[in-house]
Amino acid sequence: MKIQNNQFLSIEQLQERYLNQNRQTQNNTTQSGLSFQDILTKKAESPVAGEVKFSKHAANRLVDRNIELTKEQVERLNQGAVKAGEKGIHESLVLVDSLAFIVNVPNHTVITAMDQTETDENVFTNIDGAVIM
């Protein structure tokens, strides 16, 4: 039986082919050219550290109650959420001027918002801390 050398790859050629293929797949690049690690890092940084986002409910409350936040108020709200996080608070009441916000600190999410006219009894439940800014 006669075997021609040009039909079979040598061990070195096979190693090179599979090692190069493994290196390419280990990059885990997506169609956009980003690796999984790049996407994960980008998502983790997505809301800027200390920057809160508003839940759908909170956004609706702002619109319903005609509450418009200035940049300075949003900045103070962010600072209040950071301070709450530093103290280990999970559900925080953050008071900014005459506005009250309930913030889920671990998720950096404002759950609801109201102004002083909405807080008739001044009673807030399901919070474990408060920050006055």
Image: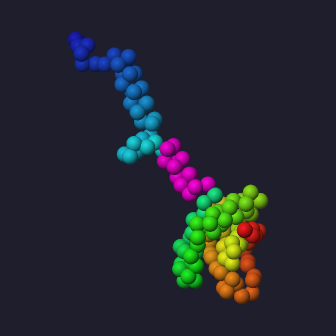
Q: In the image, is residue 116 part of the stretch drawn in magenta?
A: no
Q: Position of residue 40 (x, y in %)?
A: 52, 48
Which residue is painted at 56% across and 51% down in the image? 45
Left or right: 40 in relation to 120? left
* Residue 10 position (above or below residue 88): above
Which quarter of the figure has residue 4?
Answer: top left
Q: Nearer the viewer, residue 33 or 62?
A: 62
The furthest residue to the top: 2
Q: Position of residue 113 (x, y in %)?
A: 63, 76
Q: Nearer the viewer, residue 108 or 83?
A: 83
Question: Number of labelled discs?
Answer: 0
Q: Position of residue 116 (x, y in %)?
A: 69, 83
Q: Nearer the viewer, residue 69 or 22?
A: 69
Q: In the image, is residue 44 part of the stretch drawn in magenta?
A: yes
Which residue is painted at 75% across and 82% down in the image? 123
The kind of secondary structure the magenta stretch mainly shows is helix
* Residue 86 position (above or below residue 93): above
Figure quadrant of the N terminus:
top left
Left or right: 116 in relation to 54? right
Which residue is painted at 73% across and 60% down in the image? 83
Q: Nearer the viewer, residue 70 or 54?
A: 70
The span shown in magenta is 37-49
